[in-house]
Amino acid sequence: MLNTYSEQYPLVSAFMWSTITVGVYLLSLIVFRLLGRRPAFHPMIFCIAMLAVVLFYTGVTVESYQGDTSLLTWLLGPATVALAVPLYSQIRSIRGNGLGIMLPILIGGAIAPILALAGLYFVPLDSDVKLSLLTKSITSPLAIETSQHIGGIPGLAVVIVIFTGIVGAIFASITYRIFRVTSPQAQGLALGTVAHAIGTAQGFQMSQKIGAFATIGLCINGVLTAIILPIIFFLIS
């Protein structure tokens, strides 16, 4: 029924579902804060779960929902660009650690798709599914475009990216404690490189400096991976 309503009144439907999505996220954020900001209760987990329930009981298809919330998807691009502001706040530290910043991002960015390929080598999945998994450690806007160029499934790529980010945000603090990683630069670069935008948001929850360095990891790894993956696909195809 709501799918038909969406077709008859597209603007009203788009406004309604965008408002619901933002409202559910804000509610998830409140729950996250009430539970002590623990990574295990990341707002994205609650947000996805609640939206899934709403879509199920209203009978709205995922395709229809994606069409109605396309503006929010488009805003991912400007939001990623806006990360240049906290990045600029740490420009002096970045200039003084050029190689120390680039090297771990390059290594981390290379290891992520290699581990994905190694893990999928013995798994009987379709090639387009496997190719979608290669974009797991870059932010959603880049993952969508990159997966299209290498023959993956953009929708699946986004799901994998979100899942990777949530897992990274949840286990980052535990990993830092186990391996005694105390440097905010190292913590930020790891979060941004491996867990993209969700990891970067988690970095800002920890401190502005960690968030700024996570932004560096997010941007550099995202751009490099978006360039390198199509080249690799071209060479092996």
Image (cartoon, grey):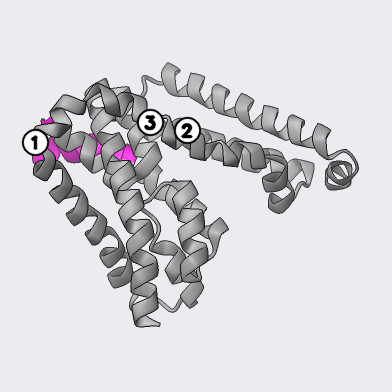
Question: Residue beneath label 3, please?
Answer: 83
The reply to whether residue 88 is in sight is yes
Badge 1: how crowded within 10 Å, few (<14), some, or many (20+)?
few
Q: Residue at x 49, y 77 (%)?
A: 126
The answer to the question of whether label 1 and label 3 lie on touching residues, with beta carbons closer than 8 A, is no
- Report helix, strand or loop for mark 2: helix
Magenta span has 3?
Answer: no
Task: Say whether marks 3 and 2 touch (CB < 8 Å).
Answer: yes
Q: Is residue 102 left or right of residue 143?
A: left
- Say the numbered circle drawn on residue 79: 2
For label 1, the residue is 180
Relative image position of residue 69 (x, y in whole percent): 67, 39
Q: How many numbered marks does the figure carry?
A: 3
Foreground label between 1 and 2: 2
- Inspect the magenta stretch and tell me whether residue 171 lies in it: yes
Q: Residue furthest right?
A: 8
Mark 2: give few (<14), some (14-19) or many (20+) Cα within 10 Å: few
Amino acid found under the numbered disc labelled 1: Arg
Q: Residues within 10 Å of mark 3 (few under 14, many from 20)?
A: some
What's drawn in magenta, residue-wise? Answer: 169-183
What amino acid does circle 2 point to?
Answer: Ala
Quarter holding the C terminus is bottom left
